Amino acid sequence: MDPGIRSLVLSRLEADAPAAGPWSDLVLAALEGQGALETELLGGAKAPHAEAPRTAPALAGAFLRQVKVEGFRGIGPLQTLELRPGPGLTLVVGRNGSGKSSFAEGLEVLLTGDSLRWKERAAVWREGWRNLHHPAASLSGTFLVEGERGACVVSRQWETGAAFEAGAASAQLHDKPSSDLASLGWTAALRTHRPFLSYNELGSLLDEGPSKLYDALSSILGLEDLVEALAALQEARRSREKATKDATDARGPLLERLRGVADARALQVAAAIEGKEWDLGTVDGALGGVASSGAGAPDADVLRGIASLEPPDPAQVKAAVAEMRQAADALRSAQETAASRSRDAAALLESALLYHATHGDGDCPVCGGKAALNSAWSKRQREVARRLREAAREADAVHQRAEAARRQWEGLAPLKPEAFTRAVDLGLDLGELVEALGTWVKAGSISDLGALAEHVESASGPLREAVVRLRDSARAELGRKEDAWRPVAVEVAAWLKGAREAERGASDLKRLKSAEAWFKKAAAGIRDDRFAPIAEKSAAIWEHLRQQSHVELGRIQLTGEGTRRRVALDVTVDGVEGAALGVMSQGELHSLALSLFVPRATLPESPFRFIVIDDPVQSMDPSRVDGLARVLETASADRQVVVFTHDDRLPEAVRRLDIAAEIVEVTRRDASVVELRRALDPVGRYLEDALAVAGTADLPSSAAARVVPGLCRLALEAACMEVVRRRRLSRGEPNGEVEQALGQAERLLQLMAMALFDDVGRSADVLARVKREAGAPLAEALKQCDETASPAAADALELARQSSKLAAWLRGLA
Amino acid sequence: MKRDDSEPRQLLALADGLLSRADPATAGLWPRASALLALGALEASVLRLWQGRAPDLQGCSMRTQLICLRSYLGDAKLAARTGLAWSALSRACRHHAYELGPTAGELRSWFSVIGELVQKVEAS
């Protein structure tokens, strides 16, 4: 997370505070990544965002002093690229494959641990990072940092045979102990202000369509964090929308399934979810079986009630019938005894005594005897009644036994009628039971105990059978219903899980949508803010680079997002609006990439005071190279600009335009032995080489004598070209025509004729004029150099010296 | 025009030595220097062929000599490759705008052609 981006978002959130809602936490969490966002949505532990990674302030104002590369890509034995720390332009020139790009890549890998130019490539590309000729691999860079007294050395080393990723990086700031790379505080800046640019990196991206270009430019802006945060918000929203959609989609088939199951729980669940609002609590209840005892599941209750019915127990029936019969016998014999008579007489007397006690003395209501009922009578008769009752007790016991025996039938089949009320609805056949029961309850109206015993005995069998049959069919029905429900219940449970997620998501969704909407606007705002100064400078640089291009570049804007993101370029071709990139050549696209790169890498907030550009001249036509040289000159006013280039066009332009620059040449021998040397202009370089060969003791003199004339000829040719170019370009001739004219001269004397007479046809007059104006020895040297087959020179050292003088004379002409 | 007849094999060995042997004294200058030596080796070898077979050709332009090589060398393919190597080497031995010196790989491939040529001429 780039703290810069974070604070930008924070300040926008604060500015929008009145509008900000409970979603603002989501925005902050999204900046921390997908994981943090989900935690926030779960209401989990709030990470202390604001206090989050406050690393040491970046070491700012770093210049490059040295890059050391060993055993890495094209470079075998350790080689050091010495640079002049401080603002200025350095050109590192070498043929393709000379190892120059290995320095550029090495520096990028050193600081970032990776190289953008490998990122998109096949594994084999990445695996080739090691130099085949040299087992040890290491990179190191020395930086001078403004405000620091000593140098800062960053190094990365690999064990023999170690994988690319295993390279260990360390950083050491002068006298301080060695630390890890992150301690420099450059990690974020390396992304936001990437000080490296290789041309295949941006050049290829420009070909790949508007969204790729957008990505390339927004990576230039260092806004990946915003893009990632927005993606996190969108992903969170999508996952929730998907949960709702999935649950809704699955509901229809589930409902259909539920309705096909004859089970109260199925109907209950169906009722709970068929509406717009789902009652997930009820669904859960139906699954957990909690509802089976509630009012909501009467069917199962009825079935369960019937299933638990007890039929009359044959042993009990038998015992009851026996008792009834015995009691009936006892009753019959008691009626024939005196006890029975006494019991009846006692009852009569007790009634008379009650009558007397109630109505007082008087006539007997039974026999009519006058004043028969009085106190004396009462007293006498009470005693009589007591004795009679005594005598009747035996008969009472018999009667009570009979009564108890009669009641026994009721207890034999304790059937609750409510158990049957809904049984018919459930499809149970009650006919048999109703009939058996109808017969059975007739027992209530049988007064004769013997007849009752007979009835109970005969009716209990059918009743028992009816109850057992009903009970069994209820039990079977119950089992059937469970079997039908169980698989549906599993489906319901699965659906419930998703539905719960959807339910939770529904509440998040509102916040997420608000956060996303706000964030989109904020991100676009930040993007525009950050891009504005770059766009301005880019347009200025484009003006330099376009040269004879008909393409005029107006406003550059990053617009849209998601799949519609693109780069809007106001391009006009000869004043007519054009289809942006479609009208641009490869060279123009590269120039555009460069126009965008340089401003971003040189923003004041970048801690890097250096920029490294690898091969910017590819596919640029010569006139544009002049513009590039000017752009680099402007950038090098306050930045250290290091440019790697594969041919001499840029150095030539720099020399011709008299731009202060240091030029380093890279050459690579066999076995990846790479050599570096400071280069003078070509004339000086050839002459220096000639003197070196002539003077070196290592080379046999025969070889020197053969090589020196050739090198001197090269020097003179270069001097002539320089003279011709300078003269003709200052006359305003187009560069292309000048080069074409120079191409016509095949021999040294023809070039000399162009330099001396501005006429390629006057080679015959050259020697005479040199002899006349520069002296005979120099004319003689020129003759030696012009020998097409480069004969051996009699005195190589002398020839080199005379050639130097001749070159100086030539250059003084124009 | 004075023609050189240095030992072609020796010149080629010198050129190869410059290329192969890392030496601070020749750092950076060897691409052009060994090209110059190799060009010398090639031309000397061709001259040597004429000495025995057609002395008149020694005075002709190199272009003419290379064309005639096809019929005298007895190996048309090698003659054609020699022609290519010659024009590449002589280009490397002239100053051309925006061009840098030849690479080690380029020089190696030219050297091998010259090596074959030298052998062929010595055998004939």
Image: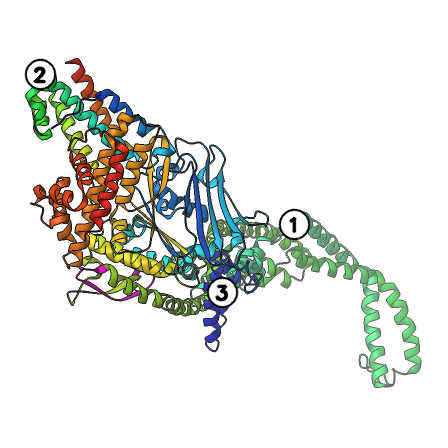
Left/right placement of residue A307 relative to residue A485 reads right
Classify mark 3: residues with Cα within 10 Å, few (<14), some (14-19) or many (20+): many
Q: Which mark is residue A254?
A: none
Of all chains, the one bearing label 2 is B
Q: Position of residue A76 (x, y in %)?
A: 40, 34
Q: Is residue A552 magenta?
A: yes
Q: Which residue is mark 3?
A: A28
Residue A407, image quadrant: bottom right
Q: Which mark is residue A313?
A: 1
Gap between marks 1 and 2, in whole Å? 140 Å
Say which label, 1 or 3, has the lower sequence index.
3
Q: Are marks 1 and 3 in contact (CB under 8 Å)?
A: no
Q: Is residue B89 above or below residue A619?
A: above
Of all chains, the one bearing label 3 is A
Residue at (17%, 37%) from the top-left corner? A780
Gap between marks 1 and 3, in whole Å? 77 Å
Under mark 2, the amino acid is Arg
As helix, strand or loop, the secondary structure at mark 3 comes to helix
Residue A545, image quadrant: bottom left
Left/right placement of residue A395 relative to residue A766 reads right
As helix, strand or loop, the secondary structure at mark 1 comes to loop
Gap between marks 2 and 3, in whole Å? 90 Å
Left/right placement of residue A395 relative to residue A279 reads right
Q: Magenta span covers which residues? A: A546-565
Q: Is residue A652 above or below residue B123?
A: below
Q: Position of residue A711 (x, y in %)?
A: 24, 36
Under mark 3, the amino acid is Leu
Residue placed most toward the observer, A19 or A342:
A19
Q: Which residue is mark 2?
A: B53
Q: Position of residue A628 (x, y in %)?
A: 27, 56
Q: Is residue A398 magenta?
A: no
Q: Is residue A529 above or below residue A158?
A: below
